[in-house]
């Protein structure tokens, strides 16, 4: 994997509690040919990474908001799922159905593109290991906009026509993510 294709982000869900400080590394892969094997590896616990369908991620900010929520839940012993990576995928969903969240946002057997998110990978070593397992090409995160499926995003997040043409679609999506525990 070429240097600089993955990006490291700093998470601080609670600015007054430094015990929640975490890092997350994101990398986008295109032309993935072994999605079936990767999905089986996630289910079998072979690696701890969130393998996300990038078609339903409007922009990286949405993933970072979901990651912040997941870290906050973990810090307060309130994980809904079994791992931080699964909690990230669950946190991307606007509803509280775990199976539906994993099916909608997690890797599918037919996935050709993949957004990989790994917590606690400041050095990038875990992402390099993961990249060796993926039969696809890593590309700059800026290419995410080329694989996004706005029609699917509108359907998943139940965005109205007016919400879908506004400037701040990610703001509407993030609002749905953070309020799902109170609105469902």
Image (cartoon, grey):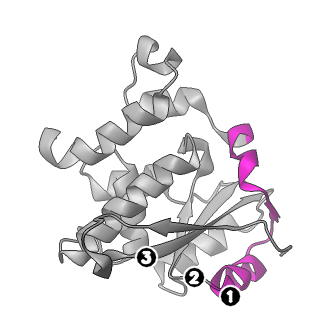
**Residue 22: assigned label:** 3
Which residue occupies 80% across, 71% down?
135
Q: Nearer the viewer, mark 1 or mark 3?
A: 3
Secondary structure at badge 3 equals: strand
Residue furthest front as drawn: 16
Quarter that holds the C terminus: top left
Which residue occupies 73% across, 82% down?
128
Query: Percent position (x, y) of residue 69?
Result: 32, 60
Callout 2–callout 1 Cβ contact below 8 Å: yes
Q: Nearer the viewer, residue 67 or 159?
A: 67
Quarter that holds the N terminus: bottom right
- Answer left or right for 122 relative to 16: right
Q: Name which quarter of the figure residue 28 lies in.
A: bottom right
Which residue occupies 35% across, 58% down?
90
Query: Percent position (x, y) of residue 148?
Result: 64, 38
Q: Nearer the viewer, mark 2 or mark 3?
A: 3
Callout 2–callout 3 Cβ contact below 8 Å: no
Decide whether residue 49 is among the magenta residues: no
Q: Which residues are magenta?
A: 123-146
Residue at image mark 2: 121
Which residue occupies 36% across, 48% down?
93
Secondary structure at badge 1 equals: helix
Q: Name which quarter of the figure residue 36 lies in.
A: bottom right
Residue at image mark 1: 125
How crowded pointer 1 is (Cα within 10 Å; few <14, some 14-19, many 20+) is rated as few
Residue 14 drawn above or below residue 120: above
Q: Reading the chain from its start, which is encountered first: label 1 or label 3?
A: 3
Label 1 to label 3, Cα distance in Å? 16 Å
Secondary structure mostly seen in magenta is helix
Residue furthest left as drawn: 182
């Amino acid at each position: 994997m070429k240097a600089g294709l993955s990006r490291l982000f700093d998470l601080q869900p609670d600015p007054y509690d430094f015990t929640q400080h975490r890092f997350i590394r994101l990398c986008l892969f295109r032309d993935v040919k072994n999605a079936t094997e990767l999905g089986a590896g996630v289910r079998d616990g072979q690696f701890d990474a969130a393998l996300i369908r990038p078609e339903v991620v409007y922009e990286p900010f949405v993933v970072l908001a979901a990651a912040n929520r997941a870290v906050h839940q973990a810090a307060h012993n309130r994980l809904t799922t079994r791992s931080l990576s699964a909690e990230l995928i669950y946190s991307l969903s606007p509803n509280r159905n775990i199976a539906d969240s994993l099916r909608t946002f997690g890797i599918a057997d037919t996935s050709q593109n993949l957004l990989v998110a790994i917590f606690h990978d400041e050095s990038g070593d875990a992402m390099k290991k993961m990249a060796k397992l993926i039969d696809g090409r890593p590309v700059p995160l800026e290419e995410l906009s080329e694989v996004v499926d706005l029609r699917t995003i509108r359907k998943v997040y139940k965005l109205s026509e007016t919400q879908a043409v506004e400037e701040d679609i990610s703001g509407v999506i993030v609002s749905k993510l953070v309020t799902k525990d109170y609105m469902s």
